[in-house]
Amino acid sequence: MLATVPQAAPRPGTYGGNRKASEMRAMTMFVTFVVAILVFASAAVRPGAGVADDDGQLLPGQQLAPGQELVSEDGRFVLDMQRDGNLVLRGSDGGVLWETGTAALGSSLVVQVGGNVVVTAPSGAPQWSTGTGDAGHVTLELRDDGRLVVVDQHGTERWSTPTVPVT
């Protein structure tokens, strides 16, 4: 004759001791978490296409990560944060119009809240900057004339690349 062992009552806060139901709930929570992260990451900046609204601007707190681009509104100019750490402005023919000359692998371009625009190495060390740290709220704009410009909240140009010949 087989003896049956009495089962303990489930503890409060558990799912009635049903292990399969607990595992399913945990898996559902995990999948929801992963999907939320993927949605958030893809909405910030799309690789190779600039910022989410593709208007040729970066606002305070936004950045270009390695391999990402900012494209002028008319699509003729591209600011490329290369994976090798160099920030390069290219014309419609792909030719280099301006570059920072930085070379810290994996660097990003960051528009800081205080007004400075900086290429930073993965360690956080600055590699290049516009020197506009006293400008307050700024926008980095890639204009249709091919210039990269830092504009303050009053519309004043605080820094820009040299004027480029537009053909």
Image: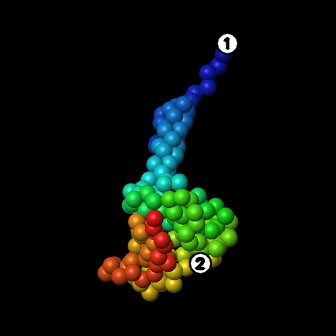
Which quadrant is the N terminus positioned in?
top right
The correct choice, above or below, for 1 with respect to 114 in the image is above
Tell which residue pokes out farthest to the top in this image.
1
User: How many numbered marks are there?
Assistant: 2
Asked if one can make out residue 61 in the rendered structure from this viewpoint, the answer is no
Where does residue 68 sit, x and y in percent of width and height? 54, 59
Tell which residue pokes out farthest to the front in this image.
167
> Which tag, 1 or 2, sits closer to the chain's start?
1
Asked if one can make out residue 159 in the rendered structure from this viewpoint, the answer is yes
Q: Is residue 76 left or right of residue 19?
A: left
Name the residue rendered at 39%, 81% in the picture. Answer: 157
What amino acid type should be assigned to the residue bearing mark 2? Trp
How busy is the neighbourhood of tag 1: few (under 14 within 10 Å), some, or many (20 plus)? few
User: What colour scheme governs how the chains and residues are painted in the rendered image of this protein?
Assistant: rainbow
Where does residue 82 sit, x and y in percent of width and height? 61, 62
Q: Is residue 95 left or right of residue 140?
A: right
Mark-to-mark CA distance, 1 and 2: 83 Å
- Labels 1 & 2 near each other (Cβ < 8 A): no
The correct choice, above or below, for 43 with respect to 17 in the image is below
SS of the residue under disc 1:
loop
Q: Which residue is mark 2?
A: 128
Image depth: mark 1 or mark 2 in front: 2
Q: Nearer the viewer, residue 128 or 24?
A: 128
Name the residue rendered at 43%, 62% in the picture. Answer: 72
Q: Nearer the viewer, residue 122 or 74?
A: 74
How busy is the neighbourhood of tag 2: few (under 14 within 10 Å), some, or many (20 plus)? some
What amino acid type should be assigned to the residue bearing mark 1? Met
Q: Which residue is mark 1?
A: 1
